[in-house]
Image (spheres, rainbow, N blue to C red):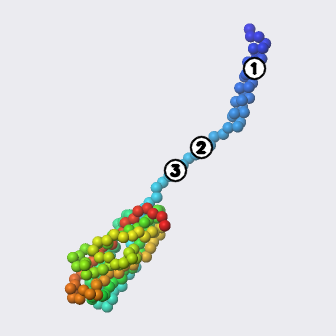
Amino acid sequence: MLGKRWMMGIVAVVAVVAVGGIGFSAFTSSAYVNGSGSAGTLGPLYFTHVKDVDGPGESCLSTITTTYNTSDTLNVYASNLAPGAYCNYYEVLHNAGSLGAEVYATLTCDSSYCPGFWYADNFATEGYSGSSAYGPLYIGPGGAISYTGELGLEPTDGNAYQGVTCWFTITITATPGTS
């Protein structure tokens, strides 16, 4: 049989372990962290039409090719322009996404008569002809900007472009951006 000292030692060890276990369980706790993430959306970008302004005898028209994607297309037409005359186009460009967008425009002339015409809008600081890319403008999430454009015939063209029609396509694209 174990001696009294051994028995007291075992009781002491058991007591220390029991008190230590109670102390450990009383002074510990658990915390759980749950998390999730989701990506924002870029676009869709889309135009809404406000108005086209004709001068006397001129024919001005804009049409919107709405893709409801990260890009959208606006087609502008002008015909029966006299040298120095121009058409004005007023649209609103919307960003329906949850992310801000840095918006760029690409201007393409779809006519062999483009060298005599010019196009300017509020993306560019000066008029463009032919094919040009420019920007960016910032549109906040769920925001919109006014888009104004002007298509005209050079004053010095004389009769060189008599009876022709010119049209430009403005394609808007975007990348995620901040103001």
Q: Give how far across and how far down residue 4 sits, in percent.
A: 78, 13
Q: Residue at x 63, y 40 (%)?
A: 30
SS for callout 2: loop
Residue 44 appears in view: no
Q: Is 109 in front, or is 91?
A: 109
Instruction: Give the mark count.
Output: 3
Residue 111 appears in view: yes
Against 113, is 104 above or below? above
Q: CA distance from mark 2 to mark 3?
A: 14 Å
Write down the residue under mark 1: 11
Q: Residue furthest right?
A: 4
Against 163, is 36 above or below? above
- The mark found on residue 36 in the picture is 3
Q: Name the N-terminal-most of marks 3 and 1.
A: 1
Q: CA distance from mark 2 to mark 1?
A: 38 Å
Q: Residue at x 38, y 81 (%)?
A: 51
Q: Name the N-terminal-most of marks 2 and 1.
A: 1
Identify the amino acid type marked 1: Val
Q: Residue at x 71, y 36 (%)?
A: 26
Instruction: Please rate how many residues cluster around mark 2, counting C-alpha atoms within 10 Å: few if below 14, some from 14 to 19, many from 20.
Output: few
Q: CA distance from mark 3 to mark 1?
A: 51 Å
Instruction: Please rate how many residues cluster around mark 3, counting C-alpha atoms within 10 Å: few if below 14, some from 14 to 19, many from 20.
Output: few
Q: Give how far across and how far down residue 62 sits, in percent.
A: 33, 78
Q: Give how far across and how far down residue 157 sits, in percent.
A: 24, 86
